[in-house]
Amino acid sequence: MAEPARQAAAAPFLEIRDLNAWYGESHVLQGMSFSIAEGELVTLLGRNGAGKTTTLRAMMGILDRRQGSVRYRGEELIGARSYRIARAGLAYCPEERGIFASLNVEENLKLLPIIDKGGMAVEEIYELFPNLAERRRSDGNKLSGGEQQMLAIGRILRTGARTLLLDEPTEGLAPVIVQRIGEVLRLLKARGFTILLVEQNFHFAATIADRHHLVEHGQVVAMIPNDELDAQRDLLRHHLGV
Amino acid sequence: MITVPLLGIPLQVLLGQLLLGLINGSFYALLSLGVAIIFGLLNIVNFAHGAQYMLGAFAAYFLLKLTGIGYWGALILAPLIVGALGLVIEQLFLKRLYKLDHLYGMVLTLGLAMVIEGVFRHFFGAAGLPYGIPSALQGGQNLGFMYLPNYRGWVIVASLIICFGTWYLIERTPLGATLRAATENRVLVEAFGLNVPRMVMLTYGSGVALAALAGVMAAPIYQVSPLMGTNVIVVVFAVVVIGGMGSILGAILSGFTLGLVEGLTKVIYPEAASTVVFVIMAVVLLTRPAGFLGRNQAAPTGNSFLADAVSLGARRWTKPVEIALLAFACVAPFFIYPLFLSKVLCFALFGAAFALLAGHVGLLSFGHAAYFGAGAYVTAYTAKAWALPPELAILLGTGVAALFGLLFGWLAIRRSGIYFAMVTLALSQLIFFVALQAKWTGGEDGIQAVPRGRLFGLVDLEQPLAIYFFTLVVFVACFLLIRRITSSPFGQVLKATAQNEARVISLGYKVQRAKLLAFVLSAALAGLAGSMKALVVKLASLADVHWSMSGEVLLISLIGGLGSLLGPIFGSFVLIGIGDYLAAAGAWVTVLQGLIFVFSVLLFRRGLVGGLDDLFGWFARRRGKAAAPLAIRPAAGE
């Protein structure tokens, strides 16, 4: 009886092992492997087309053809239907933000089901993003890019999920909003959320993350702890060109 | 007596017709609402909606007859029973189609409708069964200016409440928000933790239940008849197109409005009452292609309907098979009834004309009966009444069909995919009603005993062998023509358009013009097929222009294999064979055809020619393997 419990304790909080995924005939993920400890903020960095977004989509079960292993708190999720993965506790914030145009802000916010205790109340989310409170009756397609992004992050905080998969939350946003999102992410980390962040904006990532994974050709080619970034300049330049 | 000053129509008559219109409109609205909800989430045009409406009425009838449960009980139970059947249909059939082109869903539900309606027609015939008005709603109110039967008043009020209640549920409640979100992006909604498969299943069930509810309400007014759904479903499609596909409010408002407009037309110009909805649809499409309240959705590029079809180009085996077929066609009339074979050829030509558009351009027309029927009627009439020689009668029939093709095609090519299918369907209904009502078409009787005449004054086509070989020559000529067209640069543009329209436009081709030309060609060839058929069978009848003929030609191409030129030959052989040799089975033929539809869509989308292709491919591989080990396809999952 103690055996499985001990194993679960020993296993990483979130572990991706040998993940493969395909878009039609093209083999996009070719053995992604990495793991995240509880409470960490970890990034996937890489050029366009390296497979970062696909990794999140494969983890969420959105891709039809995927193989390998995604273990979350000891539970294997690779074969599960998408909604079961979400209910296991992975909350997804897609790159295109996925704000529903025919729903207003509040409807968007309340759309996601509560999967666990400890989610934020709607008023708490409005406190975190005051702009949204002013626009709670606006339709989703009337929001600015920044407001959309805040809504996309805000609504997954309500569900009680403890692990967030964020796909380029800073893309195309004004510096002041990027800064605000950085503050929010730090706050969430302080509150104990585990965050997997896909980023192109390396400089933004460096200000908040614990560790970075460099992704190329659908694989993790290097892992760099945030405090070794300076020492690994050459590696970064080689893989990211920054 | 008060009369309306301008029209000189007694006020009572006017109000009476408007009331009838409002009642029809109530049913249009209820049915369109269900179609719109289902279309919104599942993206399936539920062709079985009419059959499910009919099932609702029959459920009420049986509940009363077998268990003594009356109207009010039926109002609750019938939707539950039929809705449960909807859940089963979703789980057994529709669920398997979500990853395919949405047109397959339309075709499959058409097959289901044929099965359901065929079974009921077998047992209950075409006549209606009476269903009494519940005692609480008997009698009526004298409103002073007119008499309003209580039951009709109830129908109007109840359908208004149901329609706007549903609208409120979808547009203003959290449950509705979930549904709207899933309509926009169901993949993402599922990734947020909502059980979308269950939501889809329940939505289909609810839409079906709405149809059944309308059926129960209709039972005391229209009687319970197996055909009650067939008659109304095409109008409902037009209503949904006018309101804007997938728009709930649009469906409701245009349902009531068009009912009223129909009633008004009955007073002013009765002949146009059954066509006015389709005329309005054409006008709306011209001015507001997305319908009144529809969001103007971009037409999807890359039509996956072709995914199965495109793979059926010329193969190494096609030439020998073609030669074998031609040889067979030359000797067959000496041991198979030549007129049967001629009919097969006519329908094969019709199928090829249809497939030119569906398989090659990716435009699935659901109104090809219009051109086929127009050809048949014009040829039959000119050959009989004007005593034109057959070659001229055929030429005229083909020409008229081509003209209709030009007009309807010009309207229809503004849309693609499922919209295109529905628009062509509704337009073809115009031709149907003309054939039904015009004097020269002979109404229900059609044009009978059409003389075949002497071809170029030389060959007496009354001889079965003569008409057969004439048909064969025409067919082979058209076959070669279609092949020439599809392999020409023009054909390549069409093929490319089917795969990625935007890219073809960006390369500088006038895609709309190419599509229209293809449409006209297809309509002309369909008209030619109809003309030939009128001479072969010596009859042009309403069956030729009815929308079920459009379904039949789709079935012919589907059985044979869309996208393959040879396909329609096989498909026609099978389908005409079933129709002719099982004619005694009556409604069971429809059931069988429906089952073939369902079967083809679920398991056999590449058709007989696709099967043949697999077979020859398998032989080739076997032989290849014996000679030298070939590279093996990479196994899935490596």
Image (tube, grey):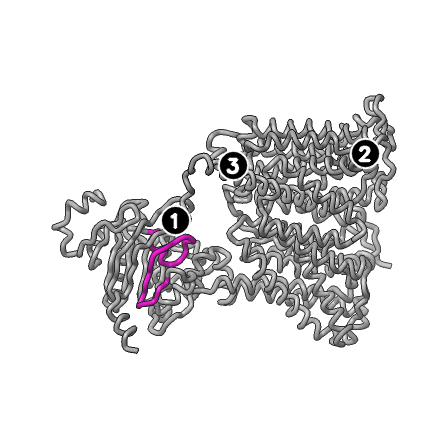
Front tag of 3 and 2: 3
**Residue beneath the point at 31% across and 68% down:** A74
Q: Which kind of residue does numbered mark 2 sit on? A: Leu
Where are the magenta residues, as a range? A53-77
Residue on which disc 2 sits: B535
- Residue A175, x across and y down, in percent: 26, 51
Considering only vertical position in the picture, is B149 above or below B460?
Answer: below
What is the chain letter for disc 1? Answer: A
Residue B132 located within the stretch drawn in magenta: no
Q: Determine the secondary structure under disc 3.
A: helix
Does residue A24 appear to the left or right of B597 in the view shown?
left
Residue on which disc 3 sits: B620
Q: CA distance from mark 2 to mark 1?
A: 56 Å
Residue on which disc 1 sits: A22
**Residue beneath the point at 71% across and 41% down:** B573
Q: Residue furthest left?
A: A231
The one nearer the camera, B448 or B6, is B448
Considering only vertical position in the picture, is B216 above or below A199?
Answer: below
Residue A70 located within the stretch drawn in magenta: yes
